[in-house]
Image: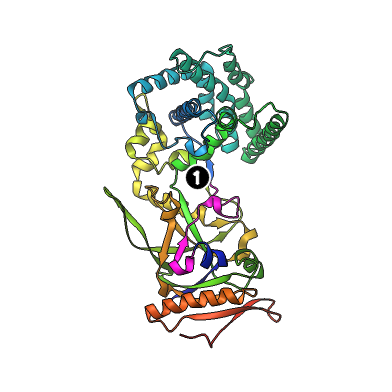
Amino acid sequence: MNKNFYRFRSIDRLTNDFKELENQNIYFAHPSQLNDPMEGYRDLYWAGDYIVWKNLFKHYLFCLERLCVLLILSDEQNNLSKENIPVLSGENDLPTPMYKDLFKRISNKFFDSPNILSLIKKISSRTTPIRRDELSFYLTNVHPFAIEIIYSEYEKSNLTSRRSFEEGTTNNITSTFLDEKFIDLLEENLDEHKREEKIIDALFAAQKHAHAQIDILQRHNGNIDTNQSNKNLVIVEFPEEYISQLERLVYPEWYTACFMSECKNSSVWGHYGDNHTGVCLIFNAKQKDNKHYLDFKGINGLGSSGPSYGNISLELHPIDYAQGFGKIDFFRSLGRLTTSTLNSMWYGLEGDRSECADEITQNEGTWRENYWKNFFRDITVKSDDWSYEKEYRLILSSSLDSYSEPASRLLSYDFRSLKGIIFGIKTSKNDKLKIIKIIKEKCLKENRTDFKFYQAYYSADNKCVEHSEMTLLQF
């Protein structure tokens, strides 16, 4: 049995600026364009052996070095952002043998530090998972030393001018919390609190909160020049931004178009229906195996000559209004990388293989099933604060990242799936006439006589927004 789903639109998007109705288009938005700041959040954690942890630090160093090069080349002329952090790349992607040799020297010098190796060993021996704030703490402490290593090698290679900086002092920063047996004290604290992980999480959350305030103060006092955004990204902000980009190694980018199972909530009309001056589109979705789908025309493949276009069917996923988010094991969820890249960059080290690879290699079918289950789980969950929306969403995603351009995310739907339109309580007569004219032309072209218009009104009895059919509007 087919089911109705509702999509609220403003008049500007529907007929004026974007002509969504005339073109039968639905735009799939990036999570950053949605109104919930927690949209798409994944509760990543890091738990693994020495092999994957050392490879993580090497990957961090690689990404930092690439951004340092961009800073030298662009200075402040071209804006850099976290999207420039090449988390999907590795040493094999460096363009020339000379460049590869440069990074090898940087890497060797970085890992020649006993403090760095000691830190990695202690982290890999942690008995509870490491979360974002704790990882950020470690990388922030390592960061000045890594910057110094990179620029000292640049100087030796005459890639940048000499600086008046006392080499070696940055290494003392890394050693401070190691000498104080910081990680050992964490483990002791866990024992005292019966392995309560939330104690550690609260500690690092407080540290991050204090660090954020110090950062604001330094910018306010002029110690950090806010006009040098590129330099600040590399020197100050990189550890945090690097962690935010690591998720790209786990899952592909995704985009969504939002629908609702009801259209009676006045707040929904006020927010998504442009203060009741917009409209609500009624879509009739096909049902198969207790799931509902809408058909579109869009990219359905990639070949040697570029993308191919055809019919695609997308499922309407119900939103789960729950408290909290599911956990994702980073080292065991690197689904965007090829097997060879996984083995060379993450799971292999000097002939040894990480135990983190076992789950994938021993039963890849089960691993992949859980991988995609978690992918959809975390992008179809919102807090209970949003439950009044009764949202469903279509998900557009590709491992090949073929939807990165906004134009490719504008998909055309079958006009026959658009069952009707509800005018808002305050939709103007001129806007109604404009919409009716567009629909009339489409109905005549498609030989349709079943399209319906409705008028929304506030029901005092039911205390919600109801709608009644405009039976005289027939073609």
Q: Which residues are magenta?
A: 19-42
Q: Compared with residue 121, is residue 425 higher up or lower down, i.e. above or below?
A: below
Would you name the residue on which mark 1 appears? 328
Residue at 44% in and 21% down: 107
Q: Is residue 419 among the parts visible in the rendering?
A: no
Residue 118 at what x, y percent from top left? 52, 21
Q: Is residue 279 left or right of residue 28?
A: right
State the image coordinates of residue 113 (x, y, percent, origin top left): 50, 16
Q: Element under label 1?
A: strand
Numbered marks: total: 1
- Above or below, 210 against 380 in this view is above
Please identify the quarter of the rendering in which residue 169 is found: top right
Q: In the rendering, at what x and y percent does residue 374 appear?
A: 47, 51
Residue 24: within the magenta?
Answer: yes
Residue ID at (43%, 15%): 157
Q: Is residue 407 above or below residue 88?
A: below
Q: Quadrant of the N terminus?
A: bottom left
